[in-house]
Image (spheres, rainbow, N blue to C red):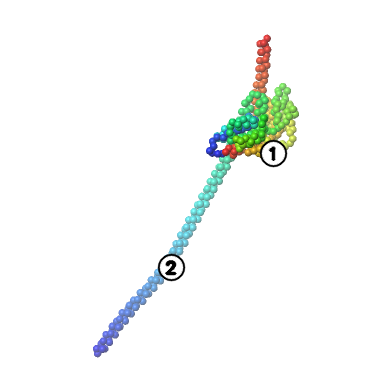
Amino acid sequence: MNSEKKEYNVLIVEDSPTMRQLLTFILKRIKGVNVVEAKDGVDALKKMSVNRFDLVITDINMPIMDGLKLVNLIRKDDIHKNVPIIIVTTEGGQEDKERAMALGANAYITKPIQSAHLLEVIKQYLK
Amino acid sequence: MEGEKEGKKSSLLFNKRAEEFLNTFKKGAEFAQQLLKENERLRYRIAQLEEENKALKKMKWEEELEFLRKRVKELEMEKEELLKKYKEVEKENIDFAKKYVEVEEENNNLANLYIASYQLHSTLDFKEVLQIITEILINLIGCEVFVIMLFEEKSNTLIPVSAEGLNIKDIPSVKLGEGKLGEIILKKEKWIRDYYPNEEINIENPFAIVPLEVKNTLIGAIMVYKLLPQKQKLEKIDYELFTMLAGHAATALFSAKLYSDSERKLSTIQGFIQLLTKK
């Protein structure tokens, strides 16, 4: 993590309130992290249009717009095309992972999550 | 006559000088002898001193060697001591790292339990409670195929109310105390197989059964048939989550049901009152 930068904006995109709360709880353990929650891909894009984010953590299976479509759109967006994206999903298949990575995701973590592992990955991308 | 006298005189003088010369020569010879002796003595002394010097040199070198040997020993001991300390610190480091992992795991577990119970009691809407139980089973435990059943006291039967990975219409009700499932649920104790089966899903043969109860009153049950592909076995936290669900999911479902019943009754009473007041 960059020691000079003090604040990080992280967007959590997850339809399950339980998972949103758990991810927020884990993220709040990192000093200087501000969490914004979105319940699906469309909600995430709305929030990205008014805020700049340092990291996006997204689920794949969500109503209205899924996580893969969201990754695809973020990579085409001029402002956020370089933002690191971590996928957190129940889809544990190799094909799903390859598809997500091919679309531009930076990391792929399967549920149920281990907070220590997730924190390690998050810290790697919060630069 | 005078010539004879003169000759005797010079002969005497000659003899005297010869004697003097002899004396001087003798003295010179004695002196040379003395010098030779002194020389011999000095040579001997030099030889003696050289021997002494050699001995001294040898002694000094041996002393130095001894000193260095001693120092090497001291340094070796110091090195041993430092290595011992290093090993101790390393062991301590490993212990700390282990403790950190344990604390981190415990923290993770507590976070899961706290969030699960918080979410379960965050609503009085029956459908939402079912949704939250489903989310906990999928996201926090890692269940892929499962059924949630509610106990109907009148018919003494458990009726499926929610299913994941199965068609709810294909799931039969379970009569309490009858069949394998009914007998396990009647005991009101969670039942989890020792091993994770790699067999086809059989409704009668789940991997885990978690009866939901409020103070010994059966509310329902959760039957788990399959875990997510990336989850090969249950962890310690999963057992704790099942225990938490057994109590908290039961309370949440019971409260939500009571609330919806009271809401329904209230609207019926209000309807009656309206009907009566209209007349």
Q: Amino acid at mark 2?
A: Ala
**In percent of the image, x 50 and y 55: which residue is there?**
B69
| Disc 1 to disc 2, C-alpha distance | 97 Å
Residue B101 can be seen, yes or no? no
Front residue of B112 and A58: A58
Q: Which mark is residue B47?
A: 2
In the rendered image, the vertical position of residue B13 relative to residue B34, given as above or below: below
Front residue of B2 and B55: B2
B24 horizontally vs A50: left or right? left
**In percent of the image, x 56 and y 35: which residue is there?**
A8
Front residue of B264 and A67: A67
Residue B7 can be seen, yes or no? yes
Q: Which mark is residue A11?
A: none
Residue A100 image point, x, y percent: 66, 37
In the rendered image, the vertical position of residue B51 relative to residue A39, given as above or below: below
The N terminus of chain B: image quadrant? bottom left
Residue B269 image point, x, y percent: 67, 15
Residue A97 image point, x, y percent: 67, 38
A104 horizontally vs B19: left or right? right
Residue A4 image point, x, y percent: 53, 38
Chain of residue at mark 1: A
Numbered disc in front, either 1 or 2 = 1
Q: Which residue is mark 1?
A: A95
**In percent of the image, x 70 and y 34: which residue is there?**
B226
| Quarter holding residue A30 | top right
Q: Amino acid at mark 1?
A: Glu
User: Please, what secondary structure does the residue beneath circle 1 have?
Assistant: helix
User: Please, what secondary structure does the residue beneath circle 2 have?
Assistant: helix
| Quarter holding residue B96 | top right
The C terminus of chain B: image quadrant? top right
